Image: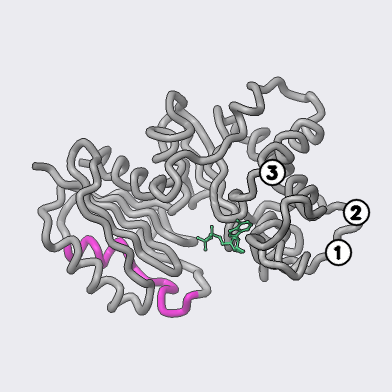
Amino acid sequence: MDYYGSIEAGGTKFVCAVADESLTILERISLPTTMPEETLANVFAFFDKYQLKALGVGSFGPIDVNEASKTYGYITSTPKVSWKNFNLLGALKERYNIPMAWTTDVNAAAYGEMKLGAGKHTQSCIYLTVGTGVGGGAVVNGQVLQGFSHPEMGHISLQRYPEDTLESACPYHENCVEGLAAGPALEKRTGIKGQLLPETHEVWEMEAYYLAQAIMNYTLVLSPEKIILGGGVMKQAQLLPKIRASFAKQLNNYVSLPDLEQYIVSCELKDNSGTLGCLLLAKAQA
Ligand code: ADP
Ligand code: ZN
């Protein structure tokens, strides 16, 4: 039997899984992200039981995905000090001499959704998670999008609502999507955690306006077949129709688009988009 491995490397947890060739998940484990050596010892203990054919890794970042770079495979400028400039892919390769796919957590999720979830039957999509941060991944012509580096869609600049004076929740940018619209920005704006905000709260209009503006910009640059939304904040069901309405208003009929109910959609694989994406990427490497 051929086994494929998946690692979703996150800032709070590492989710590891092993699947067979039909991508049926045989075993999965969630390990807390502590120090790199300790976390990896647990990762190895999990995978050592299997003869893997290939491994797919979707990591928190920023990460170095440029194969020509000396630090290819490293996690680069994370605020998690012990993981900064850590050669994650190198440590995995030292342990397992097998093909490995290496990309961002959100690129992996975009790939999983494109193949098996909300983007099925498309060749290009964007996956955007709105949670503690905002992160976006893209698949273009069936391949995850990365070049000199990888997309950082959560940090593009937005035009503010005229009356919005919130101090950005992103330490790097005064007007980025993450700083204005991630979960911590919602909480800063209202004094209430996102999950406790009533669905009728006025903040959802502004939230929809910012996310729609970001989606408009992604649309104008990449023209994907679908925009797929996930993450904790998107659990607010009233948000999606508001985003579609604001998107239509801001785009102002400039380009023709598919039916918005089919174009801007929720993710379908829930907690599995990253894992399945990594497994599919692993299989594509083998
Ligand atoms: P992470 O981004 O850390 O992987 P989540 O996607 O769950 O995890 O994002 C957590 C953020 O989303 C927090 O800021 C939290 O307040 C917010 N959040 C979680 N659930 C909801 C919800 N139902 N409605 C609005 N905001 C939520
Ligand atoms: Zn930012």
The mark closer to the camera, 3 or 2, is: 3
- Does mark 2 have its CB less than 8 Å from ligand 2? no
What residue is disc 2 on?
162
Residue 116 to residue 78: above or below: above
| Amino acid carrying mark 3 in the image | Gln
Q: Nearer the viewer, residue 202 or 65?
A: 202
Most common SS among magenta residues = helix
What residue is disc 1 on?
165
Residue 206, given in percent of the width and then of the height, sits at: 79, 51
Residue at left offset 81%, top offset 65%:
166
**Contact between labelled residues 3 and 1, with CB atoms less than 8 Å apart:** no
Residue 240 to residue 31: above or below: above
What residue is disc 3 on?
238
Give the distance between the C-alpha atoms of the residues marked 3 and 2, in whole angstroms.
24 Å
Please indicate whether residue 251 sits to the left or right of residue 34 in the image.
Answer: right
In the image, the segment drawn in magenta is 80-95
| Amino acid carrying mark 2 in the image | Pro
| Amino acid carrying mark 1 in the image | Thr
Please indicate whether residue 258 sits to the left or right of residue 207 in the image.
Answer: left
Residue 221, given in percent of the width and then of the height, sits at: 64, 35
Residue 70 visible to an observer of this rendering: no
